Image: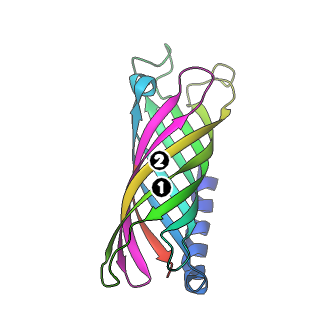
Amino acid sequence: MRGLLRGTAALAVGMLLSAPAVRAQGAEFALGGGVGVPLGDFDDASKLGWHGLAAISFVPEGWPVGIQFDGSYQQFSLDDAAAPAGFSDLKTRLIQGTGNVVFKFKSSEESTFRPYLLGGVGVYNSKVTGQDDPGDVLGGGTTDFGLNAGAGFDFKAGGAGLFIEGRFHNVMTDGSDLQFIPITLGIRFGGN
């Protein structure tokens, strides 16, 4: 966990330092986080979670359509009733990478508010973790493909801006699909 925090901090500093250089190329960097809402069968076994997100997007000037690549770390605590006997601190950890198409709605040049839609495919690694696990009960994680789609709003202020978005994720597992909605609040740097 400590390595993940250091890596995230290094990524954040690197993105902040490189934002002015890539602004001319139309690239935007984003950092965000928020709450994760489990759905379906996953909701029966899990509580609300949290997540962190780092993304880079390219939307050419004058075009409404671009691409975004992002990575996210998510964690959901297992509901006490769903945890096996003797396992009280179990969590589902998800690490994911997605590639998405982004559609930004046209707005006036003076507007600081810009809605957008995005959706795409991704690779999701999920694993149940916890201190109570002796190491051989929970087993290793699984890596599966999934789909995501959502909407958000950018609030621009110069070279930086805030965003809020929600995305539905459907991870195609061997059993029932793993479904959740992360609601993200974050900051973007760069762009045109």
- Of all residues, the one furthest to the top in this rendering is 85
Q: What residue is rendered at 61% in x and 33% in y?
A: 127
129 or 99, which lies in front?
99
Q: Is residue 173 above or below residue 27?
A: above
Density class for disc 1 (Cα within 10 Å; few <14, some 14-19, many ≥20) is: many
Secondary structure of residue under mark 1:
strand
The residue tagged 1 is 118
Q: What residue is rendered at 69% in x and 29% in y?
A: 140
Please provide the residue range marked out in magenta.
154-182
Residue 114: % across, % down: 35, 69
Would you say residue 34 is visible in this rendering? no
Tell me, yes or no, whether the two marked residues, 2 and 1, touch with CB atoms within 8 Å: yes
**Dominant secondary structure (helix, strand or loop) of the stretch shown in magenta:** strand
The alpha-carbon separation of the residues under discs 2 and 1 comes to 6 Å
Secondary structure of residue under mark 2:
strand
Density class for disc 2 (Cα within 10 Å; few <14, some 14-19, many ≥20) is: some
Tell me the kind of residue under disc 2: Ala
Q: What residue is rendered at 49% in x and 40% in y?
A: 169
Q: Is residue 9 magenta?
A: no
Q: Quadrant of residue 123?
A: top right
6 or 65, which lies in front?
65
The residue tagged 2 is 149
Q: What residue is rendered at 57% in x and 74% in y?
A: 15
Q: In the rendered structure, which disc, 2 or 1, sits on the residue that comes first in sequence?
A: 1
Q: Is residue 171 magenta?
A: yes
Residue 176: % across, % down: 53, 22
